[in-house]
Image (tube, helix red, strand yellow):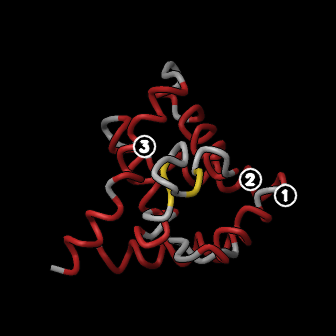
Amino acid sequence: MLIKMRVILKQIQTLLSTDFPLEDEDALQTFENKLLDNSFRMKLVTELSRYVRNTLPSTIRSMMRFLFKDSLLQEYSYKGQKKKKVFSTLGVTSIIFDAVKNMKRYQKYDKIDVEQPMKIFIAGAKFRINKIVE
């Protein structure tokens, strides 16, 4: 199962020509520039739409794990509080919203319903890193 997931991840990375999960600010900036290309955006939205889970929060967590390493997310907060960088203004945020809207199960949910699990996941990045180290 794990080997199959790695093969699928490699195929996706080749298709999108980006190494996921994003590890640093440079990779994020390169990725944000790629999002300006409409065909790349649509491929990514389609790919993220496949990460549907039983609940909206678990779906958002799955997408965020695919896209980002915790080492990058710990530098951000959703609104930029506590002198951190602002996550909500990144282009990838709209990609996540679009991917959720593409999922039949979650089309009725509002933006705020998607924001909440995203905020929680970003805020927990530092603690997940510390948990791994211990």
Question: From the image, which quarter does the N terminus lie in?
Answer: bottom left
Direction from residue 30 to residue 19 in the image, left or right: left
Q: Amino acid at mark 2?
A: Arg
At x 70% / y 67%, what residue is drawn? 31
Q: Amino acid at mark 3?
A: Lys
Direction from residue 112 to residue 124 in the image, left or right: left
Label 3, label 1: how far apart the Cα atoms are: 27 Å
> Which label belongs to residue 37?
1
* Residue 71 x, y percent position in the rendering: 43, 73
Label 2, label 3: how far apart the Cα atoms are: 22 Å
At x 55% / y 72%, what residue is drawn? 22
Q: Is residue 70 above or below residue 80?
A: below
Say which quarter of the image contains residue 105: top left
> Which label belongs to residue 131?
none
Label 2, label 1: how far apart the Cα atoms are: 6 Å
Q: Which residue is mark 3?
A: 119
